[in-house]
Image (cartoon, rainbow, N blue to C red):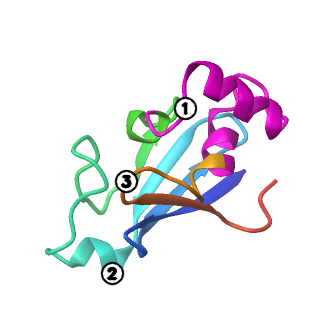
Amino acid sequence: MRTAKIYRNSVLVGTIREDADKSYSFEYENEYFQNNKLPAVSLTMPKTKKQYKSSNLFPFFFNMLAEGENRKIQLRRHQLSEDDHFGLLLATSSVDAIGAIVVAEVNGNK
């Protein structure tokens, strides 16, 4: 299981997790959820108390990944397989992320 914290403009939004069966979950932090002034992480994932679950990486996070030659270079550099979307997200979205969202890997991931 691998886990990451999601930040928007340095404010903790929630937690995303990849389970051993390659399914994914996302859950908003209580404090973020309760603050009506803070927006949802994306239009496709409105603020809710329920945990989002998916058999694929959520489109919002998948779309943060590079494509084409840039993706190939990143996969090689981080020694990741082509289908390790979550690994690539963790490796590339904690620094130099475009936009307000940062994905920070939680230590101790396996």
Instruction: Determine which residue is flagged by label 3.
Output: 99
Q: Amino acid at mark 2?
A: Glu
Measure the alpha-carbon separation of dots 2 and 1. Answer: 31 Å
Question: Which comes before the other along the chain, label 3 or label 1?
Answer: 1
Q: Are marks 2 and 1 in contact (CB under 8 Å)?
A: no
Instruction: Determine which residue is flagged by label 2.
Output: 31
Q: Amino acid at mark 3?
A: Gly
In the rendered structure, does residue 96 fall within the stretch colored magenta? no
Instruction: Determine which residue is flagged by label 1.
Output: 66
Side (left or right) of 10 relative to 32 = right
At 37% from the left and 60% from the top, the residue drawn is 100
- Residue 57 point in image, percent of width and height: 51, 35
Q: Amino acid at mark 1?
A: Ala
- Residue 105 point in image, percent of width and height: 66, 61
Tag 2 secondary structure: helix
- Residue 107 point in image, percent of width and height: 75, 68
Tag 1 secondary structure: loop
